[in-house]
Amino acid sequence: MAVPTLERPADHQELPAPGFGERARQFALRVTPSLSAILVGILMMTLIGSLLIMFTAPGALGISDRFYITSSAYSLLLAGAFGGPVNIADTLDKMAPLVLAGFSVAIAFRAGLFNIGAGGQIAIGGTLGVIVGIKFASAPAWVLAPGVLLAGLVGGAIWGGIVGILKAWRGAHEVVTTIMLNFVAYYLSAYLIECTNDCLPGIGSIRVASQPKTMQMGPGAALPLLSHLINQIHPGTFADEGSYLANVGLFIALAGVVVYWFIMKRTTLGYEIRAVGQSQKAARYAGINVRRNITVTMTIAGAFAGVAGAVIVMGPDLLQAINDTTFKTDTTGFDAISVSLLGLNGPIGVLLAGGLFAALTQGAGLMQADSGRLASNAVAALPSSYSVHVELIQFAFQALVLFVIAGQIIPQFRTSIVRLLGALWAGVRSGMARLPPLMLWSLALVDVVAAGAFVGYVVVSLISLQSVVPLDAPVGAIYSVDIDPLFTLLLLFYVAGILILLLTIGMWFIGRRLKQGSSPPLLVEAFPTAETLAATVTQTPLSSEPEAVGDDPSGSMS
Amino acid sequence: MFLSQLFQLFISDNLWHPALQFGALLLLPALGGVISERSGVTNIAMEGMMLTGAFFSAIIVLSTQSVIIAVLAAILTGGIMALVHAFFSIQFKANQIVSGVAINIAALGLTGFLLPLFTNGNGVPALPRPLTLPALYIPGLSQIPFVGSVFLQQNVIFYVAIIILLAMQYLLFHTNIGLRIRSVGEHPQAADTAGINVRLVRYCCVVTSGLLSGLAGAFLALGVAQIFNPDITEGAGFIALAAMIFGKWKPWGTALACLIFGLGEALQNRLSLLPLTGIGIIDTPLHESSLVAMVPYLLTILALVGLVGRATAPAADGIPYEPGGE
């Protein structure tokens, strides 16, 4: 058996330290995949959503009418999400917990663990935060607010840590334990809220319409609204500061981005997490304590979700009190899975995906309320009772997430997505391509055209809506808006989307032909391979775990 | 006083009738999970398959006015969802957990999207009696005081579920087919060498789990709730998953777990109705029902970590089969 030598070959040369240009290029390489993924995501989703609207609009309608209905629905979607300061503030308010919970799922995913338990971790973190917020209600804000956040962090970390311990030492599959712990958390939270007078004296439980509810947290526990802070500096900027819901939670989410990036890229722990995610066996050979690593990862994941829970209860939506069904009906933990998948588990990607998801949820409300009226003004054949339902946009988003999941779970398909995204940013990366240069550059061109069309579409549609619709008008006001000039741009937008679709299929065939070799490592690394995950599925403890067999379709990633 | 009330509750058919009904509702998808995982394909998508089945049974029964067609449609749609799962996880060797999550998301999105579309945004109305699955009264016998009202006045599907339980036990442990299924789930390479078509067996088992989950969906929408709303399943598919693990991937054990979990659910509903004034210990409205509701999930976790008898999954559960591997 040959003993590997550690001697350097004679022609070994030290690599020069990277200069500024090289570092900038590296940064671009890291960020561009996330951006491209989101862009392609928006394109795909718009495409799916518009096709759905076009095909499901009732009545005998011509193609231009159907286009009109679609474009008015999307204009309202945009207006609802970004149309005015109030809408933007609402979007930012919804975004903060989604991003934080998204990191919870993402960091576990990087370690090859599937954290479905963000919902339960949010519930425990939020409940613990509320208890602290009520117990110390008289504390000044600079003590109370961090205290509640810390309580949320600790609660979530414990709830996530349990999963990690059960996984690492007893081999209990984390998907099953997180699903079970979610329900335990919901009921535990409900129990604590229902019995606060008996179990936790001094917290108080009041009943509103026979539904148990906690008392309010101290005023210091409320996250200050951004409008309030701006008014402190420039008095009079916002007349009615209470109606702008964006709050300091946004800064907490941004801090989460930095923390996540720092852990993953700048610490030994992050390196170990990624190593464990790629191959537990290899990580063990490299001297990494896999069990400790799994526990720590799940604890951090729980901490992220717990902070998200604290941000939810401290935010302006719940008025600093929770009832026994608050967390059971809250879907943040579930949506976080989509956010993390769509964001490719990267810091920037999760931030953008969280923003996208929040914008959709926010905008869909206005769309459902007003799209029928807006469209039936111009299209006589459309029944006036028609409206585009919120569920349609949710479905389009879920379809998109399914597409991404399909790309991640089917090895052949994954290669194609990786290749597509890789080709999209290939313009900045020299020497990557085994693809024909013409195809590379045409893809890069499509990327630029699509991005331009999208940005142009947003701007033009907002301007044209702004000119005729006062955006602070009550929902349900009658609009008479003419969006005709948008059609050209819209068409371009759709064509670009369809082109990308076709190219995806083309890439798939090329990917099948090349099989291995040129897939960009940064993207593949974002998700553990199916084989790695399969190896963690077995119920046996790690030490006696059989490594998954079979050839590795993404063997080039190491 | 409290204890005697509790005792009264435990010997009343008001508790046991819903307990058995809910248990049967869990039993169908749980048995589906058993056969799927016995063949080596992890299935956490029973929730989604149930939801799809429930949705299509409600829609079809409204449009065709025929309960039988509606139930068949529910079974079929559950099977189709399972076929997608099978296609991803067997053909493409996808990660079965991710695929299961995807099926659950897809079911949620699909039903949420189609519901306002099919019903003009009004939702499904409460179903009139002729459009529901009837309870089956066995003449004479159903009048026996306790036994009759608990066991012999159940919904049609309850008896179907019992028959399927017996059939599943016989199929898995007393026939050649069962032996093949189990061998594929334990050691697919060996099974392949012995001439068993691993993929075919797995396809059949996963689709069977979908058919059973779809039937459970129809039972839920047409029999138990007699209405459809988007959150009708309320995690029943996940409790079924828990029952399957708690029952250690065996039909009888799973049935026992379903009975326990069904009892827990019925107890939770009944406890909140129990008159508790004058007990002394508790003078606020009873809040222990949340604690009772927690029990199935805690039991499952304990079973998973080996404190209540170690639950060991089939050896090849969740691992895609590679011909010629190992």
Image (cartoon, coloured by chain):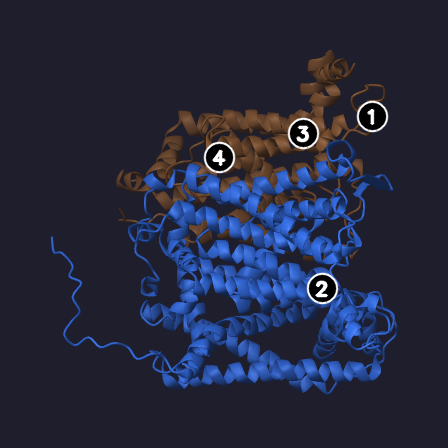
Chain colours: A blue, B brown
Q: Residues within 10 Å of mark 3 (few under 14, many from 20)?
A: some
Toward the viewer: B130 or B257? Answer: B257
* Alpha carbon distance from label 2 to label 3: 36 Å
Query: Tag 3's secondary structure?
Result: helix
Q: Are marks 2 and 4 on the same chain?
A: no
Q: Nearer the viewer, residue B139 or A420?
A: A420
Kindly indicate whether the residue at mark 4 contacts the one at mark 2 (C-beta within 8 angstroms). no
Quadrant in which residue B189 is drawn: top left
Task: State how far apart marks 3 and 1 are (Cα).
Answer: 19 Å
Return the x and y of residue A302 as percentages of the image width and height. 56, 50
- Residue placed at 82% from the left, 22% from the top? B276
Q: Which residue is mark 3?
A: B292
Residue type at mark 3?
Val
**What is the three-letter code of the residue carrying label 2?**
Asp
Circle 4: is it few (<14), some (14-19), or many (20+) Cα within 10 Å?
many
Q: Which residue is mark 1?
A: B283
Q: Amino acid at mark 4?
A: Val
Q: Residue at x 85, y 19 (%)?
A: B278
Q: CA distance from mark 4 to mark 3?
A: 26 Å
Q: Residues within 10 Å of mark 1 (few under 14, many from 20)?
A: few
